Amino acid sequence: MKQRVSALLREKLGREVVLEKPRDRSFGHFATPIAFSLAKELRKSPMVIAEELASSFDDSEVFSSVESVKGYLNFRLSENFLSEYGTWALDNPSEFAKQEKNEKILLEFVSANPTGPLHIGHARGAVYGDTLLRLGRHLGYDITAEYYVNDAGNQINLLGLSIQLEGRASVLGEDVEYPESYYRGEYITGLVEGAIEKFGKEILSDESRQKELALWAKDGVMEIVVQSLADTNIHFDTFVKESTLYSEWDRVMAKMGSGVYEKEGKTWIASEAKGDDHDRVVVREDGRPTYLAGDIVYHNQKFERGYDHYINIWGADHHGYIPRVNAAVEYLGYDSNKLETLLSQMVSLLKDGEPYKMSKRAGNVILMSDIVEEIGSDALRFIFASKKSDTALEFDLAEFKKQDSSNPIFYIQYAHARIQTLLSKAEVSKEDIANATLKNLGENADSLLFDALLLPEIVEDAFSSRQVQKLPDYLKALAASLHKFYYDVRMIGTPDEAKLLKVLLVVALSLKTGLSLMGIEAKDRMEREEEA
RNA sequence: GCGUCCGUGGCUCAACUGGAUAGAGUUUCGGACUUCGGAUCCGACGGUUAUAGGUUCGAAUCCUAUCGGGCGCACCA
């Protein structure tokens, strides 16, 4: 819709035009302040320019009116255009809001270490990434969702050690000394049991078998992780294991050329020259690679696979890490502008206004799976998609357990269900509705139809700006329009029944499509949950 | 100290990335059903957009400084 208008303006003016939605619908469907920017070069007042432009659109079939108001150019779409577009959408529901973008994107997200279950911070990045993925795919981008598994390095050894310590303490009854950092939580207990079953109790006391134990355990942890993600409708196409990459190391180092050098018996990357605070060690004196080394080979591998664009989603606490990875990418001979790193900020939880209690059982982290169990996948996804990912978020669980309009996910679902109920009570046939023409609707229904047809713009905007919260914002507003319309206009049994219900069908299509892009299934009926 | 993200009604967040009168929800108060699901709707109260300058037709948005906060600043991941 907007594209159509944009294209018309481009044709007319020979330039790209900023198109916006006026705050007040009485101004029209779209508006542009173009006359202000033309004022300088044309040396005429914006008002005059706007007047002239407005009158040049007189013969258009797309617009019913084009007016200039205080230098703004306001467009009102014709009933004919809206009617045809709405009908097309209903006839081609799976095509609605879709596009054919021609770009291959590698989207890496979550990538939590296989040393423990996902916590609430991971969940935010996961939801953000998956929502972007759904939006992008809907727009036709060819996107691969990838999870990078850090299954090498110290944290893996620590996993083996943690299982042994827990097993020696709880199973063998020994007094053990815990080091400063080790993994704890219910899942460790589970791994101890599994380890005994598989290897026998001996493995708990044999330090030389720590590595063997860890390599087995990380697969178990990954199963837990994958299950948590699946419970939230998140699925990955590929998993790349750090441990499989090091065979490439010599070749990658050679590729970096002068970007790496030897000093004090270590290998460094000259990242400072590429904007980092200082150079970084990639291989220690004893020959063990650092964390960065893994990322260098991984990003080399990514670029060798040949995508048009790369997106990483990281926890915001890693933001200082961006310059050094970009530096590596450039030394490898690639364009670091193709690599886009997005951040997902911290999350703090409240429950009934009080800080959410972290359970000792879980090792003092808030587990993603606990929250999903408490409020459900839909609510979790909605919350995390509702706020800009790069700002800190605080939310109260209690708000999302309510069954009324204060709970946005409920409010939207209710709007969708309400439409289904109306349809089931319709006194006209489905054919009558499908064949109805969406004209002479009256101001309320016309406005509602337009709102519902805005979804394509929202999807495009949300993806290209990487601001997925625009989608839930839109859905909330659309649901509000629907509820208000429902209250204001009676439909069943009136002469306009067929066409009004057809408008509602378009609204339902938008709501359902929008929700599915958030990984949430639209409901046809609301089941009232019993108060506990 | 350096880097980075941020500061918008009492609270949680928006604002089409520089556009029209800064909008929603929540809270508080007041209204609306013998009517398609009141699980809803309407109204009121509430703002010098942290502060001070600057840029221009136009600033919450861009620039500078100050104040306040989160997160980084490893040969940990």
Image (cartoon, coloured by chain):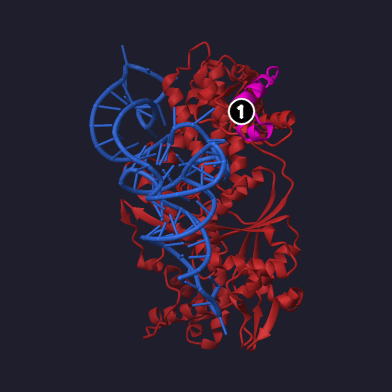
Chain colours: A red, B blue
Q: Label 1 amino acid? A: Ser
Q: Is residue A218 above or below residue A206?
A: above
The magenta stretch spans residue A37:
yes
Q: Is residue A61 magenta?
A: yes
Q: Is residue A238 visible?
A: yes
Residue A464: x and y, percent? Answer: 62, 46
The chain to which mark 1 is attached is A
The one nearer the camera, A246 or A203, is A246
Q: Which residue is mark 1?
A: A45
**What residue is shown at x 47% (from left), y 81% (from top)?**
A164
- Residue for point 54% across, 21% down: A446
Position of the C terminus of chain A, as image quadrant, is top left
Q: A3 or A424, which is in the foreground?
A: A3
The dominant secondary structure in magenta is: helix
- Report the front residue among A381 and B10: B10
Taking the image as shown, residue A260 lies to the left or right of residue B6, namely right
Q: Is residue A391 left or right of residue A110?
A: left
- Image x and y of residue A322, in percent: 59, 65
Provide the secondary structure element on which disc 1 rests: loop
Q: Residues within 10 Å of mark 1 (few under 14, many from 20)?
A: some
Give the tally of numbered discs: 1
Q: Which quadrant of the view contains residue A110?
A: bottom right
Quadrant of residue A107 within the rendered picture: bottom right
The answer to whether one can see residue A377 in this image is no
Q: Magenta segment, which residues?
A: A36-63
Q: Position of residue A285 (x, y in %)?
A: 61, 87
Q: Residue at x 59, y 25 (%)?
A: A47
Q: Is residue A62 left or right of residue A487?
A: right
Q: Quadrant of the N terminus of chain A?
A: top right
Q: Position of residue A243 (x, y in %)?
A: 65, 74
